[in-house]
Amino acid sequence: PMLTEPTPKPGAYHAVRSLAAAAADFVDRRFFLLGIVAAVGLAGLSAPALDEAVRARLALAVDWTAPVGIFLISGLTMPTHQLGAATQLWRAHLTIQSFNLLLMPGVTAAVCAPLCAAGALSASAADGMVITAALP
């Protein structure tokens, strides 16, 4: 009998290629979220090596610049025609954002203040509720 190399199964190459394409598609569609997760993970790993002053400056920077950066980058990834159409609806956007960022947190703060004064709610829980009220 003649020795021959085993022939690969015809679907094996296509299965690996399909899996690689699916992984690439997953990363492509969620690159922003994956980047944020990676950045937070790296920051968490490097935090113990930083001194207190650097941590305080980073905390201040993260508190203000991270949300602004996230919204800026997500806005920049919008197609131009969609961004142009969205700017035409500025009154609706202003109404929605006013409700979301002013009215709801204001009502929540007004409800939480007497509860904190009565000792029924801690200050940190009230802060968390006001922040959560501002989320869409």
Image (cartoon, grey):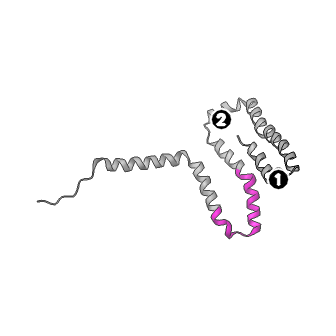
Separation (CA) of disc 1 from disc 2: 40 Å
Q: Nearer the viewer, residue 49 or 90?
A: 49
Three-letter residue code for mark 1: Ala
Q: Quadrant of residue 84?
A: top right
Q: Is residue 127 left or right of residue 78?
A: right
Q: Secondary structure at mark 1?
A: helix
Task: Assess whether residue 64 is covered by the magenta stretch.
Answer: yes
Query: Which residue appears at 71% of the width and 49% of the height?
Result: 67
**Residue 41: x, y in percent?**
61, 59
Mark 1 or 2, which is nearer the eye?
1
Q: Is residue 68 placed above or below 82 in the rendered structure?
A: below
Query: Which residue appears at 83% of the width and 50% of the height?
Result: 120
Q: Which mark is residue 54?
A: none
Specify few, some or many for label 1: CA neighbours under 10 Å numbering under 14, 14-19, or 20 or more: some
Q: Which mark is residue 83?
A: 2
Query: Which residue appears at 74% of the width and 45% of the height?
Result: 132
Q: Is residue 23 left or right of residue 105?
A: left
Which residue is disc 1 drawn over? 123
**Residue 26: x, y in percent?**
50, 47
Three-letter residue code for mark 2: Leu
Q: Is residue 77 left or right of residue 110?
A: left
Query: Which residue appears at 52% of the width and 47% of the height?
Result: 28
| Residue at the far left in the pictured view | 1
Span of residues in magenta:
44-66
**Residue 129: x, y in percent?**
77, 47
Q: Nearer the viewer, residue 20 or 99?
A: 99
Specify few, some or many for label 2: CA neighbours under 10 Å numbering under 14, 14-19, or 20 or more: few
Q: Secondary structure at mark 2?
A: helix
